Amino acid sequence: MTTKLPVLVTGGAGYIGSHAVLALTDAGWPVTVVDNLTTGFRFCIPDNVPFYEGDIEDSTLLARIFAEQRIGAIMHFAGSIIVPESVENPLKYYHNNTSKSRALVEAAVKAGVAHFIFSSTAATYGVPETSPVKEDSAKLPINPYGMSKLMTEIMLADVSNAHPINYCALRYFNVAGADPQGRTGQSTAGATHLIKVAVEAALGQRTHVSVFGTDYDTPDGTGVRDYIHVSDLANAHVLALEALIATPERSLTMNCGYGTGFSVLDVLDAVDRVTNQAIERRMQERRPGDPAALIADNQRILATLPWAPKYADLPTIVDHALAWERRLVELRKG
């Protein structure tokens, strides 16, 4: 039986972080959230979860949280995630994703926190030569977002060699969907995730969906991605934490995806079927740096954790995303 240590979730009011909070609380873990609410939403955090509004580079605040809540593990989601913005404003990304992560890790080491789960990304691979991509494939990020995350992975590896802390870096592929019970979902205005954009268009909140690139070497010419349901991803975090506690001398790096890919047109067709209507599609030029296909080799996570995805089905992912989008409309009215 795993000892359920008190867990601090950074960015716990955001999209993936709020789902991790639910996964932890549903499994009986004591949870605390810190979030500066620049992109997160207070309503996503359950009322019984201690919440601190503040920034993860505030060492005084972190020391207080660690002491008051007796934190034994961290799940770190706080950061910036928009790839084009990272190209336009790289210093923001190296500050939010790398420098602030360094401050958090330093505070954790000082407080004796023993376990650290890091929200990383498939963007660390850049444009992989092969797909599905394995964890030991070359890490050649093509934008500051991917590089800022890779730098934090390297930092965690070095720190875990020097201090009594182990870590797990989970490299996400394309995260989508929402909590099946409708408790939280992707709430950020102007989000760039394809499924989020598509369900907004289906509800009349956008006039169309842009398809960037129709001449890739894929079955229908559009980019192929590995879409993972956010609740399955959140569950992977809980299982990874259990693995870190069970084997404190070991750190882990694992891809989080299903190992199957869907094209942009596959996704839009699925949204059309679920909503029984047609979204307008506007074909555009390729975006620089977009690989034709990006699919996870997920053999390592399947072999390492008792992870059994429940929602590895594109129509289900779309249905949950759509249900949350409808709920968001009601929340904004009320």
Image: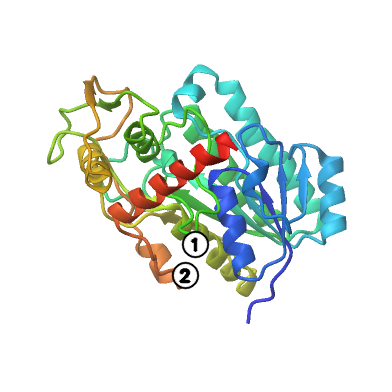
Work out whether mark 2 precedes mark 1 in sequence or the reverse, and give the earlier one: 1
Locate residue 67, reporting x and y percent: 87, 56
Q: At x 45% / y 73%, what residue is drawn?
A: 306
Q: Are marks 2 and 1 in contact (CB under 8 Å)?
A: yes
Residue 21, given in percent of the width and then of the height, sits at: 62, 56
Q: Residues within 10 Å of mark 2 (few under 14, many from 20)?
A: few
| Side of 69 where 115 appears, left or right | left
**Left or right relative to 70: residue 203:** left
Q: Position of residue 267 (x, y in %)?
A: 26, 42
On the rendered structure, is 171 left or right of 251?
A: left
> Which one is in front, 125 or 214?
214
24 is higher (above) or lower (below) than 326:
below
| Residue 208 vertical position relative to residue 243 in the rendered view, above or below | above
The image quadrant where one finds the C terminus is top right
Q: Which residue is mark 2?
A: 305
Residue 122 rendering spot, x and y as whole percentages: 41, 44
- Does residue 267 appear left or right of residue 310 in this picture? left
Three-letter code for the amino acid on which mark 1 is drawn: Ala
The quadrant in which residue 23 appears is bottom right
Q: Nearer the viewer, mark 2 or mark 1?
A: 1
Could you classify mark 1 by the number of other residues whose Cα lies within 10 Å: few (under 14), some (14-19), or many (20 or more)? many
Residue 225 figure quarter? top left
Quarter of the image containing the N terminus? bottom right
Residue type pointed to by label 2: Leu
Would you say residue 291 is visible in this rendering?
Answer: yes
Q: Give the residue drawn at x 56%, y 46%.
A: 153
Name which quarter of the figure residue 125 lies in.
top left
Which residue corresponds to mark 1? 236
Q: Secondary structure at mark 2?
A: loop
